[in-house]
Amino acid sequence: MKPVELKDVLRWLGSGKDAGTPELHSHIETAIRQLEAAVQPREIHRFFPLVSDGDTFRVEDASFTSRSLSRNLKGCTEIAMMACTLGPEPDRLIRRAQISSMADAAILQAVCTVMIENWCDEVNETIRAEAAEKHLFLRPRYSPGYGDLALESQRDFFRILDITKHTGISLTEGCLMVPTKSVTAFIGLSETDRNCILSGCEDCNMHDTCMYSRTEKHV
Ligand code: SF4
């Protein structure tokens, strides 16, 4: 997994990249080392044919409804589904830190956020390379519970990918993932290259003009 950079953790802690005392930096470095030894990254991803109908799209026997994701998937012929996790140990470390020091717990949370993002980006790059072999290009990833895609869509998402068996992630009755440092996402695959950026349409300088943008300006 890509190493965690101090500046990324400082950003999640709300400090500028050059901000923070040497003491804070030292705490962060300790948290990074602790978590690097504890995480057990796992993932599953698969490609499926995509059938779209207005604001709804189908994958295997399941239907998913989202106006903004459907707009993002326009022109896509396939869809990738991915699930990634850091494993159960980060949650345990954070729970333990919450008893002794909320500041340490906040640092561990920030490091974990960077780690799961890095892990997702790495899996995203694997999907990009596999799609390129089929001359397909990626749209940004889009998670259940984001925008107008209901969190309850996690149930079908988990069933289709058999996520618990492959990664150890389970779903609570309220559709939250355990371990909490886990992510699921759809990624549209199109024959047209839009040079989509990993961080999504919100950060893309094309989002005002792009017909596939998921941002609200295009509703
Ligand atoms: S706005 Fe940017 S990231 Fe979003 S679909 Fe268009 S090109 Fe891709």
Image (tube, rainbow, N blue to C red):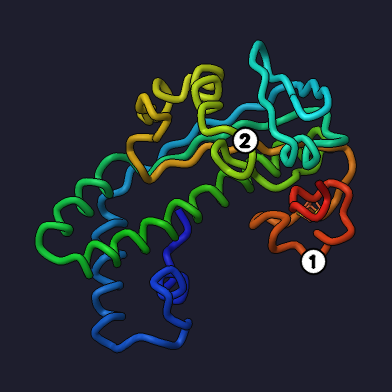
Residue ID at (38%, 45%)? 181
Disc 2/disc 1 C-alpha distance (Å): 24 Å
- The residue that appears at 37% across and 63% down in the rendered structure is 110
Q: If you read the primary sequence from the N terminus, does the residue marked by circle 2 or circle 1 appear first? A: 2
Whether 208 is drawn above or below 136: the answer is below
Q: Is mark 1 within 8 Å of ligand 1?
A: yes
- Determine whether the residue tagged by mark 1 lies in a helix, strand or loop: loop
Residue 205: assigned label? 1
Percent x, y of residue 129: 70, 43
Amino acid at the residue labelled 2: Leu
Q: Is residue 74 above or below residue 198?
A: above
Q: Is residue 27 above or below residue 169?
A: below
Q: Amino acid at mark 1?
A: Asn
Picture disc at residue 149: 2
Q: Nearer the viewer, residue 28 or 61?
A: 61
Q: Residue at x 39, y 72 (%)?
A: 13
Closer to us: mark 2 or mark 1?
2
Are circles 2 and 1 on residues that touch, CB within 8 Å? no
Q: Residues within 10 Å of mark 1 (few under 14, many from 20)?
A: few
